[in-house]
Image (spheres, rainbow, N blue to C red):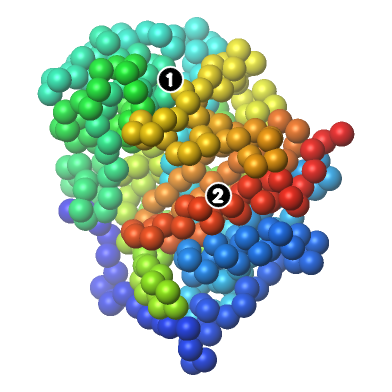
């Protein structure tokens, strides 16, 4: 396996709720606006971070402006509250960028949502029970292709690497399709990274550009997302300033952190390779919802929802569109966005049509005991209790 490793032994931080180890268990440190201005979100952030990574942050606001709260630290054994302009790996939030470029190609008449993927990529989706003549571009965008779930992960679950340690999209797709289909195309939702790896191949075929370059040229640069990077294969660096990512787990008052493995971004590519910040993710999602990235017709297609049902791979209160999730909040508002997790980071960004927004991240990818309830409560609180709709 071609994973870059340091010759030095990875530092490990182990702790418990005791006086000698207060770096990670002490009361939260805060950045941005005064914590007193957003007490409900502050309480929700503390509750989430107590079961999340070494640190957590929320960047939220409405038409009046934005604010940031941080809890814990972006670097273990240091007092470094996470800032809204620090880089981190956004994981599957990348899928919204990928979907937006596919919909741009639809706007340009180069791709059709109902077209079989075999029209553009003959022979790619075939064998092992798969038939690319029955899987449409829409199926891929909405995870209704019937592809089996596939989540590449350093060391334990990777396709065959190139000699330089990078990964080809075609090889990653073959790895994903090595599992037989779980349903007929269009019969239900099964979330699989393979869908978006195939869409990366589609973008490359139609644009005649590497997918990282196509998304950079079509979305990242036009929107002025200066702290958002889709790294090229082989570029494993995390730009500065950055939030350090960790592996680990919390069990009660005990925690164990070790730095996240370094891996090549091409392992996730169009399904999860982008690096960004809380601020830039907010800007991108707001621009998308405002019709500044794709046409109104294409945005409407992205917002056509397959409502989540038990057993279909959806989350309670969520419906899945084309690269976007729809979330109905406790206050009755509807928010749009996507979550993402890769080694070292877990995050989500949500925006509403009336100007409210919230982007949350923590610097660990949960292996067990993921506090989904507190994560969703934090987003809901920031959007419903500490922000107001535009007049």
The span from disc 1 to disc 2 (Cα, nearest Å) is 37 Å
Residue drawn at x 84%, y 45% as measured from the top left: 64
In this rendering, position of residue 73 left or right of residue 15: right
Q: Which mark is residue 207?
A: 1
* Residue 4, picture quadrant: bottom left
Residue drawn at x 21%, y 48% as measured from the top left: 157
Can residue 280 be seen in this snapshot?
no
The image position of residue 151, as x and y in percent, is 29, 43
In this rendering, position of residue 45 left or right of residue 182: right
Q: Nearer the viewer, mark 1 or mark 2?
A: 2
- Which residue extends farthest left? 128
Can residue 135 be seen in this snapshot?
yes
Q: Earlier in the sequence, mark 1 or mark 2?
A: 1
Residue labelled with disc 2:
376
Element on which disc 1 rests: helix
The C terminus lies in quadrant: top right
- Decide: few, some or many residues near mark 1? Use Cα within 10 Å; few <14, some 14-19, many ≥20: few
- Position of residue 235 relative to residue 27, above or below, is above
Q: Nearer the viewer, residue 80 or 237?
A: 80
- Position of residue 81 relative to residue 117, above or below, is below
Residue drawn at x 79%, y 67% as measured from the top left: 36
């Amino acid at each position: 396996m071609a994973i870059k490793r340091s010759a030095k032994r990875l530092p490990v931080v182990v702790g418990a709720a005791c006086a000698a180890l207060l770096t990670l268990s002490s009361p939260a440190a805060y950045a941005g606006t005064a914590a007193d201005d957003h007490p409900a979100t502050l309480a929700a952030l503390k509750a989430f971070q107590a079961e999340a990574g070494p640190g957590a942050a929320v960047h939220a606001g409405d038409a009046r402006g934005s604010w940031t709260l941080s809890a814990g630290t972006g670097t273990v054994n240091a007092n470094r509250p996470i800032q809204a302009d620090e880089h981190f790996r956004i994981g599957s939030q990348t899928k919204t960028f990928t979907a937006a470029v596919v919909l741009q190609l639809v706007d340009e008449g180069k791709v059709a949502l109902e077209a079989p993927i075999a029209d553009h990529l003959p022979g790619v989706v075939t064998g092992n029970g798969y038939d690319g003549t029955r899987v449409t571009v829409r199926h891929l965008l909405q995870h209704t292709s019937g592809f089996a779930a596939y989540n590449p992960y350093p060391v334990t679950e990777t396709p065959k690497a190139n000699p330089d340690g990078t990964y080809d999209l075609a090889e990653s797709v073959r790895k994903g399709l090595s599992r037989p289909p779980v349903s007929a195309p269009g019969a239900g939702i099964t979330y699989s990274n393979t869908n978006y790896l195939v869409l990366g191949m589609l973008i490359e075929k139609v644009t005649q550009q590497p997918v990282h370059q196509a998304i950079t040229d079509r979305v990242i640069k036009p929107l002025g997302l200066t702290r958002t990077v889709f790294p090229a294969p082989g570029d494993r660096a995390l730009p500065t300033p950055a939030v350090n990512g960790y592996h680990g787990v919390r069990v009660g008052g005990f925690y164990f952190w070790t730095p996240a493995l370094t891996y090549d971004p091409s392992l996730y590519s169009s399904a999860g390779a982008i690096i960004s910040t809380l601020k830039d993710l907010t800007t991108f999602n707001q621009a998308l919802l405002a019709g500044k990235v794709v046409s109104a017709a294409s945005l409407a297609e992205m917002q056509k929802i397959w409502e989540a049902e038990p057993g279909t791979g959806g989350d309670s209160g969520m419906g899945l569109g084309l690269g976007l999730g729809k979330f109905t909040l406790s206050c009755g508002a509807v928010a749009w966005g996507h979550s993402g997790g890769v080694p070292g980071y877990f995050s989500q960004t949500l925006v509403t049509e009336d100007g409210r927004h919230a982007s949350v991240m923590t610097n660990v990818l949960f292996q067990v005991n993921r506090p989904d309830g507190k994560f969703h409560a934090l987003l809901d609180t920031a959007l419903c209790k500490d922000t107001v709709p535009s007049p």
